[in-house]
Image (cartoon, grey):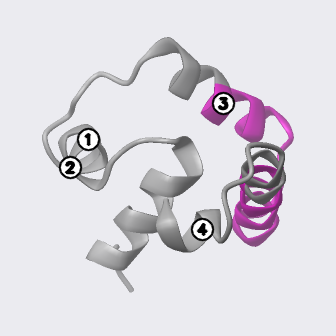
Amino acid sequence: MSLQDTPQDRDKFATLIGRSPPSVHRLLIHNGTPGRPVMRWIEAIKRMDLSQKKSLRLMTDVVSSVGERQHVDKVLIQG
């Protein structure tokens, strides 16, 4: 079985790493070069050696927490 991401997956990933969907498209589809903050964020998550589901949950929790501190309602919906 091959894993395929959807546009919705890329949009959610964009929100989780603080980038726009077009930026994520360039990163994932066209082998773009992520900035240092994105690399550090992803490397930190990978070092935790969590399952994909737990990594996604952790990233979602962190983004929600940061959004709350910045007074952004529904950050996972608004981006």
Mark 2–mark 3 CB contact (< 8 Å): no
Judge whether 41 appears above or below 20 on screen. above
Mark 2–mark 1 CB contact (< 8 Å): yes
Q: Which mark is residue 22?
A: 2
In this rendering, would 74 be left or right of 33?
right
Q: Position of residue 31 (x, y in %)?
A: 20, 34
Q: Position of residue 9 (x, y in %)?
A: 41, 72
Q: Which mark is residue 41?
A: 3
Q: Residue at x 75, y 40 (%)?
A: 45
Near mark 2 (Cα within 10 A), the count class, few <14, some 14-19 or many ≥20, is: few
Query: Earlier along the polypeptide chain: callout 1 or callout 4?
Result: 1
Distance between the Cα atoms at labels 2 and 1?
A: 4 Å
SS type, badge 1: helix
Distance between the Cα atoms at labels 1 and 3?
A: 16 Å
**Type of residue at label 2?**
Pro
**Type of residue at label 1?**
Ser
Closest to the observer, 9 or 72: 72
Q: Position of residue 21 (x, y in %)?
A: 29, 55
